[in-house]
Image: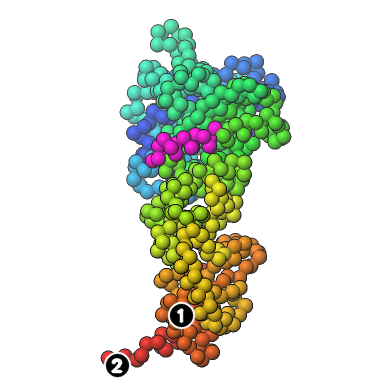
Amino acid sequence: MSVDTHRETLGFQTEVRQLLDLMIHSLYSNKEIFLRELISNGSDAADKLRFEALTDDALFEGDSDLKIGVRYDRKARTVTVTDNGIGMSRAEVIEHIGTIAKSGTREFLAALSGDRAKDARLIGQFGVGFYSAFIVADRVTLVTRRAGLGPEHGIRWESDGKGEYTVETVERRQRGTEITLHLKEGEDEFLDGHRLRAVVRKYSDHIPIPIVMASESGKGEDEVVNRASALWARPKNEIKPEEYEEFYKHVAHDFEPPLAHVHSRVEGRQEYISLLYVPRHAPFDLWERDRRHGVKLYVRRVFIMDDAEQLLPNYLRFVRGVIDSNDLPLNVSREILQRSRDIDAIRAGSVKKTLDLLTELAERDKEKYATFWKEFGRVLKEGIIEDPGNREAIAKLLRFASTHADNGSEDVSLADYAARMKPGQEKIYYITADSLPAARHSPHLEIFRQKGVEVLLLHDRIDEWLMTHLTEFEKKPLVSVAKGDLDLGGLEDADERKRHEEAAVAHKELVERIKRALGERVKDVRVTHRLTNSPACLVVDQWDVSVNLGRLLKAAGQAYPQGKPILEVNPGHPLVQRLRDERAEDRFADWSTLLFDQASLAEGGSLEDPAGFVRRLNALLLAVSPPSSG
Ligand SMILES: Nc1ncnc2c1ncn2[C@@H]1O[C@H](COP(=O)(O)OP(=O)(O)OP(=O)(O)O)[C@@H](O)[C@H]1O
């Protein structure tokens, strides 16, 4: 096999170029973090080597003492970070260092506003990693060799961060990666051992392998600058909040501190340590299937894998951190994890820890919980469907908008609702619609508003599915105000019920006529109890697919059992009264159709025959308004 030693000049992917530019400007005020990012990568590289060496000891090449080095050269004006981790092949360098293989990159760039502080936050969220070197350097040289490849497979990569980079194959005895930053004019503060040490201790103390620097004594000896032990294995009371925070930034590749964390050591039949964090912001790829950076699995301090899906269910995919098992074998694979009882126990325990953490956050810090809900509420809702065993705990964590404050903010819990229920109210009422305004202004709410009964306003796509799985809360049934026969139970007195019955009898003929006129379009027509202001509304039978869900399924191109709606009419409304008096059958049919169509529109639905609707509406307008003589 011939070795490709040629030197080639390649262009950065457009996105990289844009990102580099923005990053350098917006992160400049926090420039020292370049060191944290490079050390973090070195530590990941060491983890990867240790893991691969589990099955191939030769990869260590006789040197299993994994460490990171930081040094500087005042004359050459360089800072160099080295590691003896996994290293990279030529293809890997080109793939990882020249491109951003992240989904959502374009969306991310589009989200940038030009406002420096805001963009810095976004860029931090996105993760800049290696590229942060260009904040302080105008030239970066990376020399690396992949563990297991011969010394002739060394790679030298160099760039000024402007648009192009070169790669060439070089001889390199030492496995791992060495990154040299040629500092920009004015960045000489980093050519100082004290300054570098302070930065390392501030951000990288938790890195579990030694970070080595030459001692300042001038005698040429090395010293370890960080604590070099796995943070999660230390006793909780000895870990400072800043340490938890920096460790989070490392495992989650996040620039922002987390919202909350839970650290626990489980002993007994299963022994493991978990340190789980809830981020402050949703990552850009939260909705992507192949996202990365979840919870890392360690076995007795040895890194095993990133993002092991088996450790937490999908609806907790926003959680970051580590789980370190004492019981799993070191050679555990994804396949083994799938059928491991040990993992089942760890997973169940970790879910409980996470839900407890969120419950505590919701009780202790409403503002933080609101942040959490805004970022991850939609994901958590999936848990109601995905995890029946924890449904009750998850239900308590849900937040909804409601007619109580009626300001659209999603901050009402089911417990809040239950505490506000009226005397005689047995059910929790909700409405689903495809937008908040549609929910809020739905005619179905009229009677509830009149009686001062709170209704939850659900307008997320997932809410329809959610509610098919969430049928009760603390023994109180959850019912849609747009489904079934409205049974207000104890909210209605005998008088009202009697009036309903009388109305049904009194308007029997009208109802029958409308039913005949609408024919196949409706399942039934009846006199409403829900409307006070609107002439008509559509409802579906208790067990039929709701009008809103039907619309979603149709939009998704799915076939579903099409339950026909029931038209409810309000005989107190002048339009309906006018209709009752109409003797001409064809006009009666037209106006019945109009009533049906507008009820559908009020629901946020679309019409089958919009032109017909307009024609009928115009005819009606002409018929009811006498020609003006002005
Ligand atoms: N010291 C290193 N040794 C081996 N591989 C490295 C090293 N530094 C970077 N890499 C490779 O380059 C990739 C990109 O690194 P970079 O720091 O840009 O992003 P990241 O660490 O993957 O994620 P993020 O951008 O979220 O921090 C890494 O995922 C890794 O594969």
The local secondary structure at tag 1 comes to helix
Where's residue 592, x and y in %? 51, 81
* Residue placed most toward the observer, 255 or 426: 426
Is 543 rendered above or below residue 234? Answer: below
**Image quarter in which the N terminus is found:** top right
Left-right relation of 377 to 145: left
Q: Are marks 1 and 2 in contact (CB under 8 Å)?
A: no
| Image quarter of residue 338 | top right
Q: Residue at x 38, y 40 (%)?
A: 367
In the drawing, what numbered circle is on residue 159?
Answer: none
Q: Earlier in the sequence, mark 1 or mark 2?
A: 1
The residue that mark 2 highlights is 629
Is 355 rendered above or below residue 604? Answer: above
Q: Where does the magenta region start and end?
A: 353-368
Q: Is residue 471 magenta?
A: no
Q: Residue at x 34, y 91 (%)?
A: 627
Q: Residue at x 41, y 35 (%)?
A: 364
Which amino acid, mark 2?
A: Ser
| Image quarter of residue 332 | top right
* Residue placed most toward the observer, 414 or 441: 414
Where's residue 373, x and y in %? 46, 44
User: Does residue 602 appear in this view?
Assistant: no
Where's residue 288, x and y in %? 56, 47
